[in-house]
Image (cartoon, coloured by chain):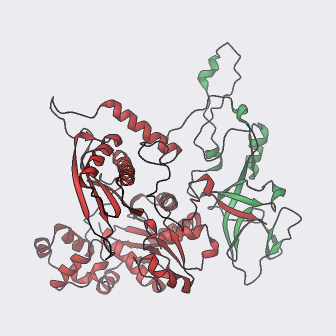
Chain colours: A red, B green
Amino acid sequence: MADRAIALVDCNSFYASCERVFRPDLKKVPIVVLSNNDGCVIARSADSKPFVKMGEPYHKIKDVLRRHGIVAFSSNYALYGDMSQRVMTVIESLVPALEVYSIDEAFAELTGISDPEQLARQIRTQVLKQTGIPTGIGIAPTKTLAKLANAGAKRWQAHTGGGVHLDSDHKRDWLLKHMPVDEVWGVGRRMKEHLALAGIKTAWDLAQADAWTLRKRHSVVIEKTARELRGVPCLELEDDPAPKQEICSSRAFGQRLQEKEPIREAVAAYVARACEKLRAQNSLCKKVRISIRTGMFNPNEAKVARGVICELQFPTDDTRLIIKAASKGLDAIYRTGYAYAKAEILLMDLRQRGEFTGDLFTREQPESVNRVMGVLDEINARWGKGTLRPARIPVTPGWGMRRELLSPRYTTDWNGLWKVACR
Amino acid sequence: MAKYRNKCRPTEDANIAMRIQSRQRVTLMSSNAVIIGPLIGSAIELPFYTCRVPAGFPSPALDHMDQSLSLDELMDVDAPHTYLVQASGDSMIGVGIFDDDLMVVNRKLDAAPGHIIIAALNGDPCVKRLAKRGEQFVLESENPRYPPRYIMEGDEFEVWGVVIGSLRRFPHG
């Protein structure tokens, strides 16, 4: 496995870059993208990073944005999703195998390629040319090292030009020694604190740590991470991700809701979305958890957060049944007198179809339901989301998302196409 | 996505004009200048019959139906490098790009003189014909009312994509 080579391709400031593709006038203008409901900053172009921190609330930084001429956008997931698919398709056409890891990152198999750097350059050129999205690339013998190489490429952008190839022990060791441990894939803030107690501060420290101790004191996962940092491959490319064990659909309302009925509508909409995801991975669920809460930060608001788990009669993916259950759950947890800010639906106890064979008395979802849900999904795939939906969900809900700075859906909506002047 | 078959004859849906710029496509289109069904970008496939069907008498040739014609395929609409962009204005009417027409834009092609391109000139997007006069690149319009624009030193010029075709719907129905 000495010649194993994995590349991590990562889109630079992906959301901001997507916005720029159709706004050449913003090429040199700093951009930030806001979370759902225009809450806080979730993406920044490189040139806005010095002025705006990640996660800052939009209403608090309006002045800063104005002062530095930073343009803000509401998140346009239809656009980002489509651009992501384009990026991934381009990369896929150039490499032997690809694992799409997130909306803006993918692992590519480069093992056996005679000149991986040349191919990496080609990937960057072609992705930029065909989609307008700039990327960075890290190449290394393991996935964890490839991630770290890519992080290094970003950190020392001017020096690396956005690409790093760890093709020698010397380069690998240098990077390990200069990277703090929380830059390592899978090491979060809490793990960082745990590791700090054991004197592990850099990626190098982690790579040198005793495997057995790591496993005993922390986890098998972190032990694997350490081995991958030493260049021993433990993680394979996954082209077919395992189905999720839980599916969540949660969102803050566009405005505070006091009454139960609009909350019920929102809950129905979130269930409908979650059920689409459930059917897309061909699973059934046996439990649904519904929770609602008020805002948690405003000191002048009464705070409450309540949730309940509802058991379904049989494992199902029927949007109607699950809405009914969640709606009952809402009746159980709703209390008047609060200004609710958010609802969350969690589908739990998931199983793949046919995973369990019940006995004679176990109820199963009737075949007719499968057909109805199939038609529902087909219609919505063809004519657009929400074309066919439970009557509980209104077309323009009062609780809908606030997205005042939304760009058009340039690539997925006939009415949003990019208009270019002939003059 | 499910593909639906439209059982009507292609010519009955002839409310769309297509103009294609590549030479090879032009011959293809002019030799059997049938103008075909709904918009680019749709997943609708129109079956293409190579025979005429006499009324009331089933033709055995019907069993040998040819493959479907697809505008998506013709214009490579599903490719990651293809974008649909709307024209706005009259500077390109000479090549038949009118106000509100849809343009099929390919970002993979290298732009060469003679191509219709989407360009960004100093951050300003526009549709022009790329030309070269001597050593200098020029952005030309296809309407005498608009003068050519020479690309000067200090201009920031970028090709966004090459327009490979356009599409217009006429009033109907």
**Quadrant location of the C terminus of chain A in the rendered image:** bottom right
- Tell me where residue A297 sits by quadrant: bottom left
Q: Residue furthest top?
A: B57
Q: Is residue B75 left or right of residue B100?
A: left
Q: Nearer the viewer, residue A341 or A223?
A: A341
Height in image: A58 above or below A279? below
Relative image position of residue A273 (x, y in whole percent): 39, 50
- Tell me where residue A364 sits by quadrant: top left
Visible residue check, residue A28: yes
Q: Nearer the viewer, residue A147 or A292?
A: A292
Query: Looking at the image, how many numbered discs can be counted on the residues?
Result: 0
Q: Is residue B155 left or right of residue A162?
A: right
Q: Residue furthest front?
A: A337
Q: Nearer the viewer, residue B89 or A196?
A: B89
Q: Is residue A189 left or right of residue B149?
A: left
Height in image: A2 above or below A316? below
Relative image position of residue A123 (x, y in whole percent): 50, 67
Relative image position of residue A208 (x, y in whole percent): 20, 81
Relative image position of residue A36 (x, y in whole percent): 43, 65
Identify the residue shown where x is 29% and y is 48%.
Answer: A326
Visible residue check, residue A142: no
- Tell me where residue B63 sits by quadrant: top right
Height in image: A166 above or below A96? below
Height in image: B42 above or below A400? above
Identify the residue shown where x is 31% and y is 42%.
Answer: A317
**Quadrant location of the N terminus of chain A in the rendered image:** bottom left
